[in-house]
Amino acid sequence: MSRVTCQKFVDADFFTTFVVYLASIMEKEYKKSYFLIPGEANAQQEMPLTLLATKIIEIATEHANTLNIGHASMVDKNLGWVLSRLTVEMRHWPKVNEHYTIITWIESWNKHFSERNFEIQNAQGETIGYARTVWMVINTVTHENAGTTELCLQDGLISDRECPIAKQAKLKIVECDNPVNYTFTYTDIDFYRHVNTVKYIALLVNQFTMDDSDRCSLSRFEIAFMSEGKYGDQVQVMRQTVDGVSSFAIRHGERPLVRARFALLPR
Protein backbone atom coordinates (compact mmCIF):
# COMPACT_ATOMS: atom_id res chain seq x y z
CA MET A 1 0.00 0.00 0.00
CA SER A 2 1.40 3.37 -0.99
CA ARG A 3 2.01 6.17 1.50
CA VAL A 4 -0.74 8.27 -0.18
CA THR A 5 -3.30 5.44 0.05
CA CYS A 6 -2.33 4.75 3.67
CA GLN A 7 -2.68 8.44 4.51
CA LYS A 8 -6.16 8.46 3.02
CA PHE A 9 -7.15 5.60 5.32
CA VAL A 10 -5.65 7.41 8.33
CA ASP A 11 -7.40 10.66 7.41
CA ALA A 12 -10.71 8.87 6.87
CA ASP A 13 -10.40 7.05 10.20
CA PHE A 14 -9.57 10.30 12.01
CA PHE A 15 -12.47 12.10 10.34
CA THR A 16 -14.92 9.35 11.31
CA THR A 17 -13.69 9.36 14.90
CA PHE A 18 -13.92 13.14 15.05
CA VAL A 19 -17.47 13.15 13.67
CA VAL A 20 -18.53 10.53 16.22
CA TYR A 21 -16.91 12.59 18.98
CA LEU A 22 -18.68 15.76 17.85
CA ALA A 23 -21.99 13.92 17.64
CA SER A 24 -21.58 12.64 21.20
CA ILE A 25 -20.84 16.15 22.47
CA MET A 26 -23.79 17.61 20.57
CA GLU A 27 -26.05 14.90 21.99
CA LYS A 28 -24.90 15.54 25.55
CA GLU A 29 -25.18 19.31 25.27
CA TYR A 30 -27.88 21.49 23.77
CA LYS A 31 -27.43 25.15 22.85
CA LYS A 32 -29.88 27.85 21.82
CA SER A 33 -29.45 31.57 21.17
CA TYR A 34 -31.98 34.29 21.93
CA PHE A 35 -32.53 38.02 21.51
CA LEU A 36 -34.05 40.07 24.35
CA ILE A 37 -36.79 42.20 22.83
CA PRO A 38 -38.22 45.26 24.66
CA GLY A 39 -41.50 43.49 25.38
CA GLU A 40 -39.65 40.83 27.39
CA ALA A 41 -37.47 43.19 29.46
CA ASN A 42 -38.23 44.40 32.98
CA ALA A 43 -38.32 47.99 34.27
CA GLN A 44 -34.51 47.96 34.54
CA GLN A 45 -34.32 47.07 30.83
CA GLU A 46 -32.88 43.65 31.66
CA MET A 47 -33.93 40.05 31.37
CA PRO A 48 -36.31 39.30 34.27
CA LEU A 49 -35.84 36.22 36.43
CA THR A 50 -39.20 34.88 35.27
CA LEU A 51 -38.06 34.95 31.64
CA LEU A 52 -34.81 33.15 32.46
CA ALA A 53 -36.79 30.46 34.30
CA THR A 54 -39.08 30.14 31.28
CA LYS A 55 -36.12 29.75 28.90
CA ILE A 56 -34.47 27.21 31.22
CA ILE A 57 -37.61 25.06 31.20
CA GLU A 58 -37.98 25.54 27.44
CA ILE A 59 -34.45 24.49 26.50
CA ALA A 60 -34.48 21.59 28.96
CA THR A 61 -37.69 20.34 27.32
CA GLU A 62 -36.23 20.68 23.82
CA HIS A 63 -33.04 18.82 24.76
CA ALA A 64 -35.00 16.04 26.47
CA ASN A 65 -37.15 15.65 23.35
CA THR A 66 -34.05 15.22 21.16
CA LEU A 67 -32.90 12.46 23.54
CA ASN A 68 -36.33 10.76 23.44
CA ILE A 69 -36.82 11.35 27.17
CA GLY A 70 -39.05 14.41 26.82
CA HIS A 71 -42.77 15.09 26.93
CA ALA A 72 -43.30 13.89 23.36
CA SER A 73 -42.19 10.34 24.25
CA MET A 74 -43.60 10.31 27.80
CA VAL A 75 -47.15 11.56 27.29
CA ASP A 76 -48.55 8.18 26.21
CA LYS A 77 -47.19 6.68 29.44
CA ASN A 78 -48.88 9.36 31.55
CA LEU A 79 -45.45 10.58 32.64
CA GLY A 80 -43.94 14.07 32.70
CA TRP A 81 -40.95 15.98 34.03
CA VAL A 82 -41.52 18.59 36.74
CA LEU A 83 -38.98 21.01 38.18
CA SER A 84 -38.12 20.27 41.81
CA ARG A 85 -35.31 22.76 42.48
CA LEU A 86 -33.79 25.71 40.66
CA THR A 87 -30.63 27.63 41.59
CA VAL A 88 -29.40 30.60 39.55
CA GLU A 89 -26.25 32.73 39.86
CA MET A 90 -25.81 35.70 37.51
CA ARG A 91 -22.87 38.09 37.18
CA HIS A 92 -24.65 40.10 34.49
CA TRP A 93 -28.21 40.05 33.19
CA PRO A 94 -28.80 40.38 29.42
CA LYS A 95 -30.10 43.83 28.53
CA VAL A 96 -32.76 44.79 26.03
CA ASN A 97 -31.68 44.33 22.38
CA GLU A 98 -28.82 42.01 23.40
CA HIS A 99 -28.23 38.48 22.17
CA TYR A 100 -27.60 35.70 24.68
CA THR A 101 -27.12 31.94 24.56
CA ILE A 102 -28.10 29.15 26.94
CA ILE A 103 -26.31 25.78 27.01
CA THR A 104 -27.74 22.83 28.92
CA TRP A 105 -26.52 19.36 29.85
CA ILE A 106 -27.37 16.50 32.20
CA GLU A 107 -25.07 16.18 35.19
CA SER A 108 -26.48 13.02 36.79
CA TRP A 109 -29.54 10.97 37.54
CA ASN A 110 -30.76 8.25 39.86
CA LYS A 111 -34.05 6.37 40.16
CA HIS A 112 -35.73 9.38 41.77
CA PHE A 113 -34.27 12.57 40.24
CA SER A 114 -32.18 14.01 37.42
CA GLU A 115 -29.76 16.94 37.75
CA ARG A 116 -29.48 19.27 34.76
CA ASN A 117 -27.26 22.36 34.50
CA PHE A 118 -27.16 25.50 32.37
CA GLU A 119 -24.61 28.10 31.29
CA ILE A 120 -25.70 31.55 30.14
CA GLN A 121 -23.43 33.44 27.75
CA ASN A 122 -23.52 36.95 26.30
CA ALA A 123 -23.23 37.79 22.61
CA GLN A 124 -19.42 37.57 22.82
CA GLY A 125 -19.55 34.02 24.18
CA GLU A 126 -18.54 35.11 27.69
CA THR A 127 -20.16 33.33 30.63
CA ILE A 128 -22.49 35.63 32.56
CA GLY A 129 -24.30 33.06 34.71
CA TYR A 130 -25.09 29.47 35.59
CA ALA A 131 -28.12 27.55 36.77
CA ARG A 132 -28.60 24.19 38.48
CA THR A 133 -31.86 22.26 38.38
CA VAL A 134 -33.26 19.06 39.85
CA TRP A 135 -36.13 17.35 38.05
CA MET A 136 -38.47 14.51 38.96
CA VAL A 137 -40.87 12.41 36.91
CA ILE A 138 -44.51 12.38 37.94
CA ASN A 139 -47.50 10.36 36.92
CA THR A 140 -49.62 13.01 35.20
CA VAL A 141 -52.85 11.34 36.32
CA THR A 142 -52.09 10.79 40.01
CA HIS A 143 -49.46 13.60 40.27
CA GLU A 144 -47.29 11.24 42.33
CA ASN A 145 -43.54 10.67 41.94
CA ALA A 146 -43.13 7.97 39.27
CA GLY A 147 -39.33 7.70 39.28
CA THR A 148 -37.06 7.62 36.24
CA THR A 149 -36.77 3.86 35.72
CA GLU A 150 -39.30 3.69 32.86
CA LEU A 151 -37.29 6.18 30.78
CA CYS A 152 -34.34 3.84 30.09
CA LEU A 153 -31.83 6.62 30.79
CA GLN A 154 -28.32 5.95 29.51
CA ASP A 155 -25.11 6.91 31.28
CA GLY A 156 -23.70 7.93 27.88
CA LEU A 157 -25.96 10.98 27.92
CA ILE A 158 -24.33 12.41 31.05
CA SER A 159 -21.91 15.26 30.33
CA ASP A 160 -18.68 15.96 32.21
CA ARG A 161 -19.09 19.70 31.62
CA GLU A 162 -18.66 21.56 34.91
CA CYS A 163 -21.11 23.85 36.66
CA PRO A 164 -19.10 25.84 39.22
CA ILE A 165 -21.91 27.27 41.35
CA ALA A 166 -22.79 25.64 44.67
CA LYS A 167 -25.66 23.21 44.84
CA GLN A 168 -28.76 24.33 46.66
CA ALA A 169 -28.59 23.91 50.42
CA LYS A 170 -31.67 23.18 52.50
CA LEU A 171 -33.84 26.28 52.55
CA LYS A 172 -34.95 27.35 56.01
CA ILE A 173 -38.45 27.51 57.41
CA VAL A 174 -39.78 31.07 57.25
CA GLU A 175 -42.24 32.61 59.67
CA CYS A 176 -43.60 36.15 59.80
CA ASP A 177 -46.43 38.06 61.48
CA ASN A 178 -47.77 39.79 58.37
CA PRO A 179 -47.95 37.34 55.44
CA VAL A 180 -49.23 38.45 52.04
CA ASN A 181 -52.37 36.61 50.97
CA TYR A 182 -52.90 35.47 47.39
CA THR A 183 -55.42 33.28 45.57
CA PHE A 184 -54.27 31.28 42.54
CA THR A 185 -56.30 32.11 39.45
CA TYR A 186 -56.87 30.47 36.07
CA THR A 187 -53.77 32.04 34.44
CA ASP A 188 -51.55 30.59 37.20
CA ILE A 189 -52.37 27.01 36.17
CA ASP A 190 -50.41 24.90 33.67
CA PHE A 191 -51.41 21.92 31.52
CA TYR A 192 -50.80 19.52 34.43
CA ARG A 193 -53.57 21.51 36.17
CA HIS A 194 -51.34 22.67 38.99
CA VAL A 195 -49.65 26.04 39.57
CA ASN A 196 -47.06 26.84 36.92
CA THR A 197 -43.46 26.98 38.12
CA VAL A 198 -42.87 30.48 36.77
CA LYS A 199 -46.04 31.79 38.45
CA TYR A 200 -44.57 30.96 41.87
CA ILE A 201 -41.42 32.89 40.94
CA ALA A 202 -43.46 35.87 39.71
CA LEU A 203 -45.41 35.92 42.97
CA LEU A 204 -42.14 36.08 44.93
CA VAL A 205 -40.53 38.70 42.67
CA ASN A 206 -43.59 40.90 43.17
CA GLN A 207 -42.83 41.09 46.89
CA PHE A 208 -39.94 43.44 46.04
CA THR A 209 -40.57 47.13 45.37
CA MET A 210 -39.53 49.10 42.30
CA ASP A 211 -36.96 50.85 44.48
CA ASP A 212 -35.52 47.48 45.54
CA SER A 213 -35.00 46.53 41.90
CA ASP A 214 -33.62 49.95 40.94
CA ARG A 215 -31.01 49.83 43.70
CA CYS A 216 -30.06 46.15 43.63
CA SER A 217 -29.51 43.31 41.18
CA LEU A 218 -30.25 39.65 41.82
CA SER A 219 -27.01 37.69 42.19
CA ARG A 220 -28.27 34.30 43.44
CA PHE A 221 -31.72 32.77 43.50
CA GLU A 222 -32.80 29.43 44.97
CA ILE A 223 -36.23 27.84 44.98
CA ALA A 224 -37.49 24.43 46.09
CA PHE A 225 -40.94 23.19 45.05
CA MET A 226 -42.31 21.07 47.86
CA SER A 227 -45.93 20.35 46.95
CA GLU A 228 -48.35 21.45 44.29
CA GLY A 229 -50.74 24.38 44.42
CA LYS A 230 -54.06 24.26 42.61
CA TYR A 231 -56.63 26.59 41.15
CA GLY A 232 -58.44 28.58 43.85
CA ASP A 233 -55.93 27.82 46.62
CA GLN A 234 -55.62 30.73 49.05
CA VAL A 235 -51.96 30.92 50.05
CA GLN A 236 -49.78 32.98 52.34
CA VAL A 237 -46.42 34.44 51.28
CA MET A 238 -43.99 34.63 54.21
CA ARG A 239 -40.80 36.72 54.09
CA GLN A 240 -37.71 37.30 56.24
CA THR A 241 -34.82 39.55 55.15
CA VAL A 242 -31.39 39.55 56.80
CA ASP A 243 -28.27 41.28 55.40
CA GLY A 244 -29.65 41.62 51.89
CA VAL A 245 -30.85 38.02 51.69
CA SER A 246 -34.61 37.50 51.55
CA SER A 247 -36.01 34.07 52.46
CA PHE A 248 -39.55 33.20 51.40
CA ALA A 249 -42.15 30.52 51.89
CA ILE A 250 -45.47 30.06 50.17
CA ARG A 251 -47.91 28.03 52.24
CA HIS A 252 -51.41 26.70 51.78
CA GLY A 253 -52.58 26.52 55.35
CA GLU A 254 -49.94 24.47 57.14
CA ARG A 255 -48.76 22.82 53.92
CA PRO A 256 -45.56 24.31 52.42
CA LEU A 257 -45.67 24.72 48.65
CA VAL A 258 -42.43 26.59 48.01
CA ARG A 259 -39.33 27.82 49.81
CA ALA A 260 -36.98 30.31 48.17
CA ARG A 261 -34.07 32.65 48.78
CA PHE A 262 -32.98 35.82 46.95
CA ALA A 263 -29.49 37.33 47.38
CA LEU A 264 -29.22 40.90 46.07
CA LEU A 265 -26.18 43.08 45.41
CA PRO A 266 -26.07 46.88 44.94
CA ARG A 267 -25.95 47.96 41.32
Image: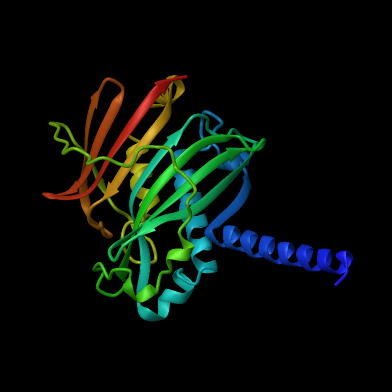
Give the colouring mode of the picture. rainbow
Position above or below: 87 against 197: above
Along the viewing direction, whichever of 264 and 163 lies nearer the viewer: 163
Q: Quadrant of residue 125?
A: top right
Q: Quadrant of the N terminus?
A: bottom right
Residue occupying image coordinates x 42% and y 30%: 218
Percent of width and height locating residue 139: 29, 72
Res 17 seen here:
yes
**Residue farthest to the bottom?**
76
Residue occupying image coordinates x 38% and y 50%: 133
Q: Quadrant of residue 187?
A: bottom left
**Residue farthest to the front?**
1
Q: Quadrant of residue 74?
A: bottom left
The mark total stands at: 0
Position above or below: 209 against 15: above
Percent of width and height locating residue 87: 37, 42
Res 208 seen here:
no
265 left or right, relative to 230: right
Percent of width and height locating residue 184: 29, 53
Position above or below: 113 against 257: below
Position above or below: 243 against 161: above
Along the viewing direction, whichever of 67 and 10 lies nearer the viewer: 10
Percent of width and height locating residue 177: 12, 31
Along the viewing direction, whichever of 150 and 213 lies nearer the viewer: 150
